[in-house]
Image (tube, helix red, strand yellow):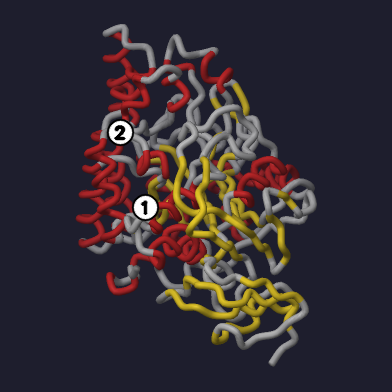
Amino acid sequence: MPELATVIRGVDAVLPHNRSKVDLGIGAEGRIAVIAEAGTLTGDAIVEAEGLIALPGAIDLHVHINTFFGGTTTRDDFFAGTSAALFGGTTTVAQFAIPRPGETSLEAVDRTQEEARPAAVCDYVIHGCAVRETYDASLAQFGRLTERGIRTLKVFSAYTDTIGLSLGQIHRLLARAVEAGITIFVHAETDSLVREGIEEAVGRGDLGPHGHAVSRTPLAEDDAIRSIADLARDIDATVYFVHVSAASSVASLAELRARGGRILAETCPHYLFLDASVYDAPGGEQWICSPPIRSAEHRAALWDALEAGVIDTVSSDHNCFDIAQKASRRADFRAVPNGLPGIEHRLPLLVGAAITGRLGWVRLVQLSSETPARILGLWPRKGALVVGADADLVLIDPAGHSNLGVGHMATDYSPYKEMSVSGRIERVYRHGQLVVVENELRAARGSGAWLPVHAAPIIPPWSISATRRGR
C-alpha cells in the first residue's frame, strides 16, 4: 500500500460507471493513489466525508477571461477568473486566445500564456483562434501550434465584417486541421441570416434587448451547423459546435451524427436554466449573448439532448462584463457587449439538477469533466476519479444549498439573480492540495499549471454509448 498524504474517508464517489461509497487515497505527488472500500485506508491527513459526494474537478471548455469584445474588455484577469472557477468546483479551464487587431493565432496564444502564467490558480488549457485579418498567417502556423501543445482552434461563421470567416475559408481551415490533428471549435451562425435579422429589428425600431433576441434566429444557428458539418464530414474533420441553443439545431445534430460525422456539441447553463423572458425584464441587456437565450420550448429540447447524448458537454461561455458595461449601451443592442458571467455557477447548477433527479450523476460528470478531458486528450489524467488521475476533486454536501449571486466573480451581477439550488461545495482539491474550503481560497497566485495538449481524443466522445449515460 502506498503512503497516503490525504484520505477522503467514506465519501459517495461518482466513478466513471457508477456511484460508490469509498475511501479515496491521495499520494504525496498529488494523484489518486488508491480507491478502496470505505473505512479501510489510513494516511497523514484524514477527511471524514460521510454524507458528502465526490466529483472529479470540473473542466470548463469555454471561457473568455480578460477578453476584448465590442470596444470593451471583460472585468476579470486570470487571478479573478480562475479563483471564481475554483470556488465553483472547476479545477481546469480552457481559455480562447482570440487574436487582437494584427495578431496571428500563435501571437495570441503567446500573449494569453503571458497573462495566465503569473496569475492563474487553476489549471488551464489554451485554444487557438483564427480570424479574418490574419487568416493566411494563422493557417501557416498550424504545425507550430501543435508543437506548442495547441490542439484545438476556434472559428466564427458570424461577424464576417470583423473576425468571422467565410465558408470557403472554414473549408480550407478544416482540411489543414485534419493534417495537423486539430479539433475545430465553431461559433455557428450564418452571417447573412444574422444580418437580415438585425436589419429587420432595426427597421422596426426594436433596438432593445428584445430586438437582439429575435434578430439571431434558430435558423441562423441551424443553417450554419448543417453547412459546416457537411464540409467537415467530406474531409473527416472533427468539429465541436459551441453554445448550441436551439431545438432545430439539436435535431440536426442528431441527424448528422447518424450519418457518421465526427461532430461534437456543447450547450451552456444559461440556455438550460433561463428563458427568453429575461429580455423583457428590467435590465434585460444584462442577458445579451449570442446566440440569445431562447424560449422554454428550446430549453426543453436541450435537456432532452443532454440525456440522449446529442449534447456532449456543458460549458459556461464565461464573459465577465458588469452592469455599467451593458447598461451604457442598452439604447442599441448592436453596441452591447455580448456574453454573461458564469464560470462559478456552471457546476452548482448541474449539481442541483442531479440532486433533484433531472440529471444522472454519471451523466453530470461526463458533461462537466470526463468528455471535456477526452476532447482535450487529457483523460484519464483529468476528468475521472480513477487511480493515477490528478487528485482534482470536489466534495459536495447534497443537503446544503448554493446561492447563485455574484459570488467571487469580478462583476456586480449574476444572470441567475440570487437563484438558490440544492447542493453546496464544501471542499475543492487541485493536485491533492486543498484550494477552497469554507469560502476561503488557499491557492497561491500563479500556482495553476498550463496543460499543453499533445494527444488527440483518446476515445472519441461520440462513441460513448447510451449505456454509459447512467444515473
Q: Earlier in the sequence, mark 2 or mark 1?
A: 1
What residue is at 50 percent from the left and 49 percent from the top? 401
Residue at numbered disc 1: 265
Kind of residue sitting beneath label 1: Ala
What residue is at 62 percent from the left and 32 percent from the top? 100
User: What label sits on residue 294 in the rendered view?
Assistant: 2
Between 36 and 252, the one lying in front of the other is 36
Quarter of the image for residue 328 reads: top right
* Lateral position of residue 166 relative to residue 107, left or right: left
Q: Dot 1: what SS? A: strand
* Lateral position of residue 228 relative to residue 110, left or right: left
Quarter of the image for residue 356 reads: bottom left
In percent of width and height, residue 186 lies at: 41, 45
Using a 10 Å C-alpha cutoff, classify the residue at mark 2 as few (fewer than 14 neighbours), some (14 to 19) or many (20 or more). Answer: many
Above-or-below relation of 102 to 111: above
* Lateral position of residue 240 relative to residue 257, left or right: right
